Image: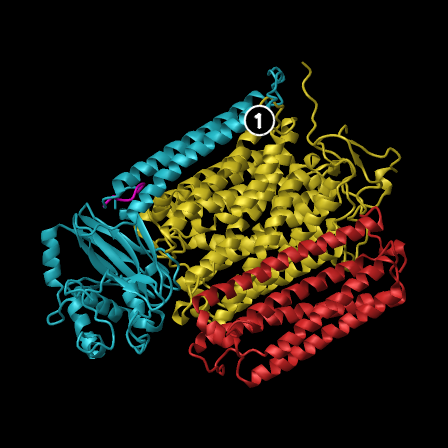
Amino acid sequence: MTTHEALGEQYPDLAHQGETAEFGMWAFIATEVLFLGGLFAAYTFYRYLHPAGVAEAAAHTKIIIGSANTAILLTSSFFMSWASLAARAGDNRVVFRVMAVAAVLGVAFVVLKGIEYTEEIGEHLWPGPSFHIETAEPKAGEVFYFLYWLMTGIHALHLMIGIGAVATIAWRARRGDFSPVYHSPVRVVSLYWHFVDVVWIFLFALIYLPGRGP
Amino acid sequence: MTSVSVTDDLPDPSTRASYLTNGATLASWLLTRDHKRIAILYFISITAFFFVGGAAAALIRINLLTPDGTILDAETYNRTFTLHGVVMVWLFLVPSVPTTFGNFMLPLMLGARDLAFPRLNLLSWYLFIASGIIVLAGLVIGSVDTGWTFYEPLSSGYSSGALVVVVGGIFINGFSSILTGLNFVVTIHRLRAPGLTWYRLPVFCWSLYSTSLILMLATPVLAVTLFLVAAEHFFHLGVFDPAYGGDPLLFQHMFWFYSHPAVYIMILPGMGVITEIIPVFARKKIFGYKFIVWSSVAIAVIGFVVWGHHMFVAGESIYAAMVFSFLSFVVAVPSAIKVFNWLATLHKGTISFDAPMLYALGFILLFTIGGLTGLFLATLAYDVHATATYFVVAHFHYVMVGGMVSAYFAALHYWWPKITGRLYPESWARFAAVLIFFGFNVTFFPQFILGYLGMPRRYHAYSPELQVWNVLSSAGSSILAVAYLLPLFYLTWSLVRGQRAPANPWEATGLEWTVPSPPPTENFERTPVVTEDPYNYPEPVE
Amino acid sequence: MNGIPFLPPSASSITGEFNVLASALLGVTGLVMILVVWLMFRFCIHYRKSNPGADRNHRIKKSWHWEVGWTAASLLIFLGLYAWGADFYLREHHAPADATDVYVVGKQWMWKVEHPDGQREIDALHVALDRPVRLVMTSEDVIHGFSVPAFRLKQDVVPGRYVTLWFTPDKIGKYHLYCSQFCGTAHAAMGGWVTVLDPGDFQKWLAANTTAGAGTLAGQGGLLYRKLGCSGCHERAAGVGPSLAGLYLHQVTLRDGGTAVADDGFIRSAILEPATHPVAGFKTTMPSFAGQVDEEQVVALVAYIKSLAGKGPP
């Protein structure tokens, strides 16, 4: 793709277009914060109503997989930042390699999450008639697990979209699309990736850590 | 044109292809990235939804001709007003002005060739259409009779599974809204022509900006709320339904946290339209530009913290109610500022009364009545009597129909020559404007009296002594129905037989009037440079 | 029912002030509306295009004087209205101490009313002239709204909790009772009449509507109390649960150190969800009675426990 093809007719130049795309991603992240904020608010409200029930249920989550996944995502963000820097320098080879690593780490996260989900379904932690948990307040446990599936599911969906986007950009880098003048897609995708990463850190704290203290 | 310096070596407009003629295949429309064509796609779909919602309103009014409601049975009546509310709110009022006139005019007013993200814009339309089809399917085939507010636990515990379909459709509709809002915000920030500073922006752009902010920040909360309603329906979570330990008031808080700002989503673009039109037909600079602009922003911000005024009798804390009542009075102040500034603009103007101006004047009167009756409802002790009665129905129809729909028709007539390249028949349009004003008042004013008498809303049958006002209201609605159908005919006629429109039929300022009618696909041959304030009409010679 | 109705009847102690408030609102907003209409028509007629002779010179330039003027004026008027409405609303929410408690249970699609002396009615409420009444209301299914336009009062009746509404009827007559919160198919049919009788007629009505052998509401609750076996734990001698004598409206110390006032709502949820009300000094061994008793039976139990109020401290 030549720089001429990449430029939308409504923009004076590529730099302006790139900054606009980044601004658009920030705006999108703002709406995502409100969307996830609604869910976090529901979670907080429920935990406030049933502190003991939520803590007991949260102790049934798989802390080892959760921690491993946190480490994986943080590492992937490191590679995404590397990709941004390399793109600014126009080094398509490095961009391709580090983004491929980030995508693979993303896939690893999804695979581990899948294993975790399978185990949890086996333990009857999917809300519904067959839900079963050995705690004093099983109803609160069921709501906790509903929110767990919903929030981690939405996060996983975001991450899978992110993996697709990163793979596409990596492929374009391999084709040699980016230059010191034109690299905004790398920066926009990495913004998105960091956001998904930050959301996970919140989820980790809210879902895996309650009920594990002394 | 004094307000802008346009490049002087433009080719003859007739040799440039207009956006309408640039490609005639169906694919050239359905896969277009041109904001003007997408606006037309929205316009066609929204018109269809408006008449679907209108037909439901007509059924409601016919049923209420007799006190025992024999024309529709209770369930059909409840489904009908649910359909009316859902369709009118999400498929007409929320998208109405922004997605049509906003989409079409925003890049033209900014001196840009398109919105920042044209593909996203097309995606918004597809999401909108998908949501419209899903919502209508759920409402018509399924039997959803909860009202557009989906109050818990009625919605999750006592209604059919079609509720989830409707709620899912509205969820998708929310994404469409968010993407449109995001596109507008980014476009206004990034794609203003050289010299077009924030304070030189037409007020319409400012009102779209405020609206878009609310769309982006409030809609996600609605999405979460509706998601939880669907989950409550399937899993009996106990978030909202007290039978499972939930709190139904939590639903109301979350629902109105979106739905109150949503009424400002609906009215702010209308206020923007009126602010565009009044200076043109008064030949005078808008009075208090900065006050009008910042009152829009103030409405958008304060509008986020008044949601509790929907719950004065719902069982919320009486002290919370006092705070929400106070804030509701505060949010009325910026609206009052706008009305006074519009009136001051008329002072010492040179006023002509073309159809857009008639609609705009009608808007001011009807919106003022709607706003002033809002003060009644913000007054706590009064609200206890009037809430959930026809007084509320009348109040919000004065704002939403008398205000917003009038503004929509004002915009339609004002920009019709620009969009279609044809002039509409002026005398028919004036007649329709007057008829709408008249029919509207006959329909909705009696409802204030019905509400004060205590007639609750959403009643399929009522006490016989209230019949006289109901019959009057229904009679008015038949006038209103004819008045709304009239433009459909004469505007369609004008597409074929109307006179060709010049680039600037109203001799208005603003960049959208510097390009040919209809505009070429790329809008501007060269990016214009703006050197003056908006609405810079010549001062009288002293 | 002759003629065209303009105003609802006024039949409670607050309607006098309410009507003044409504008139004031109408007066203030009416003046604003007249001002807007007058300015619009004056400007539109005088400065019409076909009147080139109008003086269009010396336009108002300094706009901020005007802006500050009308902003401040609007805000001041609004503040006055706000203060009045809010103060009135607060007073509407404080029932007099001598009010008679009448229980109301809403369900799709009827109002069930239970008087303290055991009289029951459906979709109707009989009250005595000039006697304050406090309604303690709940719903068995969805949210309903208890609305009596002639009293200018309305309250949403929310399932899972008690809400209250009080009034003093001051005019004999029959007034509409509506359900004001949409509650499903027969919402419009969920209503009836509130009848205000003079005290003598009200006594006669009470006597005529007493079911032989049923006893008072508290009496019915007492029977249920023993039938459900509550006395086994809650009588002073048993000591497994806290004594209920003198409990009503007293402060209860909870296990986490907090306190709560044992009002109707507290007693209701202590019966239905004992786990959420751990009283200090006792283990929560009480099972939930949710599903075993309906809201009407809970009302009777609450009335019984209230009747123990005067029988010694807890």
- C10 is within the stretch colored magenta: yes
- The residue under the point 70% across, 28% down is B536
Q: Residue at x 89, y 64 (%)?
A: A176
Q: Is residue B439 visible?
A: no
As rendered, which of B47 and C311 lies closer to the eye?
A: C311
> Residue A178: image x %, image y %?
87, 60
Q: Give the image location of residue B190, x and y in percent.
A: 74, 46
Please tell me the colour of chain C.
cyan
Q: Is residue B308 magenta?
A: no
Residue located 50% across and 74% down the image: A214
Chain A image colour: red
Residue type, mark 1 in image: Trp
Residue closer to the observer: B123 or C115: C115
Q: From what the image shows, is residue B506 above or below residue B152? A: above
Neighbour tally class for label 1: few under 14, some 14-19, many 20 plus, Cα within 10 Å: few
Q: Of all residues shown, which one is farthest toward the bottom?
A: A122
Q: Is residue B309 visible?
A: yes
Q: Quadrant of residue B111?
A: top right
Q: Is residue C25 left or right of residue C245?
A: right
Residue C285, horizontal then vertical, whole percent: 31, 78
Q: Quadrant of residue A92?
A: bottom right
Looking at the figure, which quarter contains the N terminus of chain B? top right
Q: Quadrant of residue C114?
A: bottom left
Quadrant of image for the C terminus of chain B = top right
The part of the chain drawn in magenta is: C5-11
- For disc 1, the marked residue is C64
Q: Nearer the viewer, residue B175 or B525?
A: B175
- Rendering colour (chain B): yellow
Chain under disc 1: C
In this view, the residue farthest toward the front is A214
Coordinates of residue C300 in the picture (x, y in percent): 22, 68
